Each structure stands twice: as structure tokens, then as C-alpha cells.
Image (cartoon, rainbow, N blue to C red):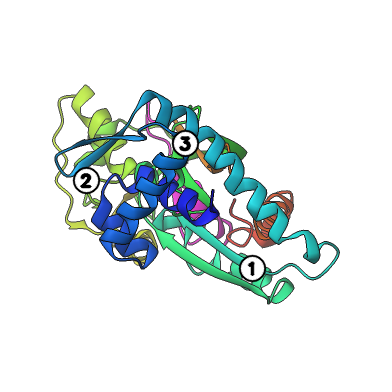
Amino acid sequence: MELRTVETFIKLVEMENFSRTAEWLGYSQPTVTIHIQQLESELGFQLFERIGKKVILTNLGKLFLSKAREMQKIEEQMLHLGKVGKEVSGSLRIGSIESLINPYSANLINHFYRRYPKVKLEIITSHTTELLQMIKQNTLDIAIGFGNKIVDRECSIVYARPYRLSFVAPPDDEFAGPRQIELSQVLSRPLLLTERSSIYRQELEDMAANVDAVISPIIEIDNTMVLLELVQRGLGISFLPNYIFEKSLFENKLSILDVKGCDRNYWCQIFHHRNKWVSPPMQAFIEMVIGSSSNKNPESYGKAIF
């Protein structure tokens, strides 16, 4: 049994389509078909039910998949045997939500690259649900998401930290200060919000529905750093997680509004597939993130955001 046919099988399970699998692996579609037929011939049973253009695992195929992933993990470990004790090298595919890839987190990436220059970094941004799917398809090594706590048997959470969602405004805003205000008062003001697909916007829409209010933002953009800059310039109020504006808050460039019933906590989480072998680049990144999060110096806000 050849490892390349096993790898083709695993990728076909992830992609659920022969043509997409061939494109991903750089093979022709007939080559993928031959690999699967060869594997089925060696095993003596059918791996897939071929229904239309989509392939579905048979019961024996599901059993073989767990063994195939073990083989893949062992292969990765063997390839690193000669690198034990040497400088960390290889590649690292990181997925993250957009708001965590900003000028502040660039400090962490810069630090990682300077410490591990032989590691090739590939960073992809998407929503947490899509990152979770990419982890399951093995198109990412590790992901950084934001939202409710992930409860999934296929994923291993290696780090989790709660963050609060808050309304933010310029320091001289009429609502700034210790007094508590109603949600309806805030919603009547100019709002600068993320697009409807973001978790922050969905949470705000739910809160507004509870008080029979309609949200009408003056600006919608899926770029939290632009929103933060516009709030600091006095254009309006926004609703964001506090890891985005900690530095601005410390520098007195904005204020958190005390809005009744609007305390919402979500989680920044780092996760990978449960069966994924934690390679040296993955381990180095995890340790660096956890190390940066332990820095409690206010001067470092926005630099150690995880």
C-alpha cells in the first residue's frame, strides 16, 4: 500500500469530489480514480458510494479513514525525525478571522518570523464557521476563531480566552461616562457596524429585536480597524470586541458605553483537528501566543491580543 494512494483517499474524503481533489493534488482526474481503485483492490472492499458527482464513505470506508489518518500522522512524525534538536522549519497554515489580522497582531507575526525564519507562514482569513470546516478538511494546520465556545469532537481547543462585546464611542460623546443608558438610546445614534454576516452584527441584531428596534447603520464594512478609526474621529458609535480597542481605550481615544443589558462575552479560541499531529511549527506558534497573552503590561495592549 502506497502512502500517496492513502493521501489521495484522505483528500477525496475532505473534498467530496474527484475533480476538486485532482486539482488540489495536482493530478489528473483519472489518476485520482486509479489511486482509489488501487486502494480498494488492495483492501478488498469498496471505500465510497458514488452517487452523482458526490462521493460518500461506506461503513468500511469510515473505519479505514481513521487508520489512514493515523498513517498520515506517523508519516509526518517520521519526516521530522532528523530535525529533532535542529532549528524549527517547515510550513504553517494559519486561519484567522479578519479582526485578529490587523496592525497589532502583525507584531506577533513579525516576532514569530524573526524567531523562526525557516518556517513558511500562510495566513488565510475567513469566518469562524468556515475556519472550522477548513480544519476538518486539513487545509489549515491551526485556526484562530471568535465566537461561542467550540464544542466539536473533531477539534482540539489549545487556548481560549473570553472577550467582551461593547459599544464604543469617542471620549467626548454625550453618552460617555459612568451613567447607564438604554439600548434604544444608542440605536438612535449614527452606527458604524460590520456586515450582517459577522458575529458582532448578528449579536447586535438579536439584542435590537428583543426591544423591537430596527438597526440602520450609516456605514457597514467588514473591516474592524477602519470602523475603529472612524469612531475615534467622531463619526459615530460601533459595537466591537474589546481586543480590538484595548490600546485605543488605554490611550483615551475612545470610551466604552455602559448600555443596559448589553454585556456579552465571546471567546477567542485557537484550535486544530483532534487527529492532527502537532508539528514543531504549530507547537512554536501555540507557545508564542500563550506567552504573549500572559503579558499584563497595559503598554502592550494591542500587541498581545490573544
Other-residue count near label 3 (Cα within 10 Å), few / some / many at <14 / 14–19 / ≥20: few
Mark 2 and mark 3 residues within 8 Å of each other at the beta carbon: no
Q: Amino acid at mark 3?
A: Leu
Mark 1 and mark 2 residues within 8 Å of each other at the beta carbon: no
Percent x, y for residue 255? 46, 51
At mark 1, the secondary structure is strand
Q: Nearer the viewer, residue 114 or 2?
A: 2
At mark 3, the secondary structure is helix
Is residue 220 rendered to the left or right of residue 180? left
Q: Amino acid at mark 2?
A: Arg
Q: Which mark is residue 90?
A: 1
Q: Which residue is mark 3?
A: 43
Badge 2 or badge 3: first in the primary sequence: 3
Badge 1 or badge 2: first in the primary sequence: 1
- Label 2 to label 3: alpha-carbon separation: 49 Å
Percent x, y for residue 92? 57, 62
Would you say residue 252 sits in the magenta stretch? yes
Percent x, y for residue 303? 62, 62
Would you say residue 260 sits in the magenta stretch? yes
- Residue at the extreme right: 85
Q: Nearer the viewer, residue 47 or 268?
A: 47
Stretch in magenta: 241-263
Q: Which of the 4 image quarters holds residue 84?
A: bottom right
At mark 2, the secondary structure is loop
Percent x, y for residue 132? 42, 42
Can I make out residue 272 in this image? yes
Q: Nearer the viewer, residue 192 or 141?
A: 141
Q: Which residue is mark 2?
A: 196
Marker count (numbered): 3
